[in-house]
Structure formats: structure tokens, C-alpha cells
Image (spheres, rainbow, N blue to C red):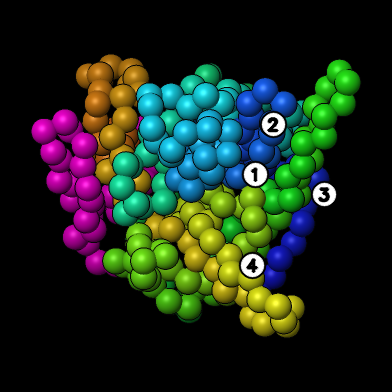
């Protein structure tokens, strides 16, 4: 079944999936989605952050220590209340072998039920061909600037489709990282949103949706595999554990990130502690 449904009310997923907005001075870019993987860590698509850098920073992507722009993450609780978090830091690979980036928030995320925050469960293994997947993201983001306030609007949607192909080493030069093809509809702005398998685990991340002139053409979209994220080097504080830098795989090993099948990921680290990953398990 292929389905695309927009949400009119907040739900549990809107507490875990965040709407992103980059801004500088009077320029706003409310495009992009991210989701919670730890109490104060989000995962998103690297190209979302790169787009902010290119549009708002005024320099080449990744040049310099910090971007001259701000990034904000919005959370909608099931009670209807909105929470705003500032992104404190971003870690992403310098190369283009993965379209993934980890973001640190300025504080742990709040939940409606007041329980201790935790992230969505991820699965390093992609869903099998022929299986159904569910994805969520925010699209059609608009920032309207008034005299005393800025109104941010967006559409939250769930899209459903079937896995058609898996590309463990990437599809081609355009999609050079591990990904899989689905016949679900991905809209601009949904990039970075979670893709769930039939067990409710995050098995991918919304990457790219192809556009066709004929509206009756079956959707064609791509999701980034999750496992390369475990090679991202970060220095986020870990209570009771040594300071960084360390690969995100350590967060899975110590249960800070809830991950299935992380044992199949093998890392190769350089002298600076930065690494690349390979999946040596069964994909």
C-alpha cells in the first residue's frame, strides 16, 4: 500500500520528530526534519545542515569552525504545547559517504508524560525488499515575519510505501552512500525524518524524493541507511564515561542510543579518532 496522509493534530510522533529552522538576521529557512536518538541528541540529514550553511552562512560548506547562523528545533507535545530548542552543536562527516548528521540540543527534551526522555529505537539493518515502511516529516515550511513576532507554519505528514531496492554501497554518484529505494512520497522539508520498519524501529532516514510531471506515476524516493551514523565522531558529554572525541558507536554500546544490530558495524579510526564504518553483519 502506498499512502500519504497529513496530520491535523499532534501525536506521539511529533514529540520525537522535530521541525528544524535555520535563521540569520531576517532570513529564515524552516525546512528540514530531525528525530530524537538520545535525551538531547537529534539525527538529521547532512544535506539539511549543508543547505543552511550555504544559504545563511555566506561561506563554503564546512569552512570555519562554526556557522554564522542559528538552528532551532521545534517539538509539538500531544497536549498541543510547543517547545523550542536551540541546536548547540552539530557533528557530521567531512566526506560525502553518508547523508547523516548528529545535533546536540541546549537541554534534554521534555515529554507530555514527564517520563525521562529517551530516543527512538534504531535498527542498523535495513528493511527487506518487499516490506512496508512508514516515514514521517515536516514539509511546506513557511516563516511569516510580523512587526512583533515570527509565525512558523508547516505540514506534518506520514507516508507509507514498499521497499523496492537496497543499495548497500550507494546507488550512484548522486546517492553515493548506503540507501534503499521505496515507492513512498517524500516532499521537500521532510528530509531528515525517520523511516520505520514494521517493528516500529527506525531503519532509515528520509533523503530524497523524485519528482514526476505525471501525477499518476508511482512515487520514487530514497532513504539513507542508519548504520553509518555510528561512525560519526563527537565529543558530547556522557555521564560517568570518559570525554570525547569518540565514535557514536560508543553511545549504542553503552545504551545511550537504543540500537538493534549495532554489533554488525565495524569501525576504522584514524590518528584523530575519526572513523569510517562498514557493516560486516548480514544486510
Classify mark 1: residues with Cα within 10 Å, few (<14), some (14-19) or many (20+): many
Classify mark 4: residues with Cα within 10 Å, few (<14), some (14-19) or many (20+): many
Label 2, label 3: how far apart the Cα atoms are:
27 Å
Is residue 142 depicted above or below 91 in this figure? below
Q: Which mark is residue 27?
A: 2
Label 4, label 1: how far apart the Cα atoms are:
17 Å
Residue at image x 67%, y 82%? 217
Whichever of callouts 4 and 1 sits on the residue coming sooner in the sequence is 1
> Mark 2 against mark 3, which lies toward the viewer?
2
Where in the figure is residue 134, as x and y percent of width and height? 58, 62
Is residue 235 depicted above or below 19 in this figure? above
Q: Which mark is residue 66?
A: none
Q: Is residue 31 visible?
A: yes
Q: Quadrant of the C terminus?
A: bottom left
Whichever of callouts 3 and 1 sits on the residue coming sooner in the sequence is 3
> Mark 2 against mark 4, which lies toward the viewer?
2
Q: Secondary structure at mark 2?
A: strand
Q: Secondary structure at mark 1?
A: loop
Whichever of callouts 2 and 4 sits on the residue coming sooner in the sequence is 2
Q: Which residue is mark 4?
A: 185
Where in the figure is residue 120, as x and y percent of width and height? 49, 43
Q: Which residue is mark 1?
A: 31
Whichever of callouts 4 and 3 sits on the residue coming sooner in the sequence is 3
Residue at image x 58%, y 39%? 55
Amino acid at each position: 500500500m502506498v499512502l500519504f496522509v497529513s496530520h491535523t493534530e499532534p501525536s506521539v510522533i511529533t514529540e520525537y520528530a522535530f521541525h528544524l529552522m535555520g535563521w540569520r538576521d531576517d532570513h529564515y529557512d524552516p525546512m528540514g526534519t530531525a528525530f530524537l536518538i538520545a535525551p538531547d541528541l537529534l539525527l538529521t540529514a547532512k544535506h539539511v545542515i549543508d543547505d543552511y550553511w550555504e544559504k545563511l552562512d555566506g561561506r563554503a560548506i564546512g569552512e570555519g569552525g562554526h556557522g554564522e547562523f542559528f538552528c532551532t528545533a521545534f517539538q509539538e507535545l500531544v497536549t498541543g504545547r510547543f517547545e523550542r530548542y536551540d541546536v548547540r552543536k552539530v557533528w557530521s562527516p567531512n566526506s560525502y559517504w553518508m547523508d547523516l548528521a548528529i545535533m546536540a540540543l541546549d537541554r534534554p527534551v521534555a515529554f507530555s508524560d514527564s517520563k525521562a526522555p529517551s530516543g527512538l529505537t534504531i535498527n542498523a539493518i535495513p528493511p527487506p525488499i518487499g516490506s512496508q515502511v512508514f516515514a514521517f516529516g515536516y514539509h511546506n515550511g513557511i516563516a511569516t515575519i510580523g512587526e512583533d513576532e515570527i509565525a512558523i507554519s508547516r505540514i506534518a505528514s506520514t507516508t507509507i510505501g514498499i521497499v523496492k531496492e537496497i543499495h548497500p554501497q550507494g546507488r550512484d554518484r548522486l546517492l553515493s552512500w548506503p540507501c534503499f529505494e521505496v515507492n513512498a512520497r517524500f516532499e521537500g522539508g521532510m528530509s531528515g525524518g525517520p523511516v520505520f520498519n514494521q517493528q516500529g524501529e527506525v531503519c532509515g532516514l528520509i533523503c530524497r524524493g523524485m519528482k514526476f510531471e505525471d501525477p499518476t506515476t508511482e512515487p520514487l524516493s530514497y532513504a539513507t541507511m542508519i548504520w553509518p551514523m555510528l561512525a560519526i565522531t563527537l565529543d558530547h558529554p556522557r555521564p560517568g564515561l570518559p570525554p570525547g572525541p569518540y565514535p557514536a558507536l560508543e553511545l549504542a554500546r553503552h545504551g545511550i542510543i537504543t540500537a538493534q544490530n549495532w554489533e554488525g558495524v565495524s569501525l576504522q579510526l584514524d590518528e584523530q579518532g575519526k572513523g569510517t564504518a562498514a557493516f560486516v553483519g548480514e544486510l
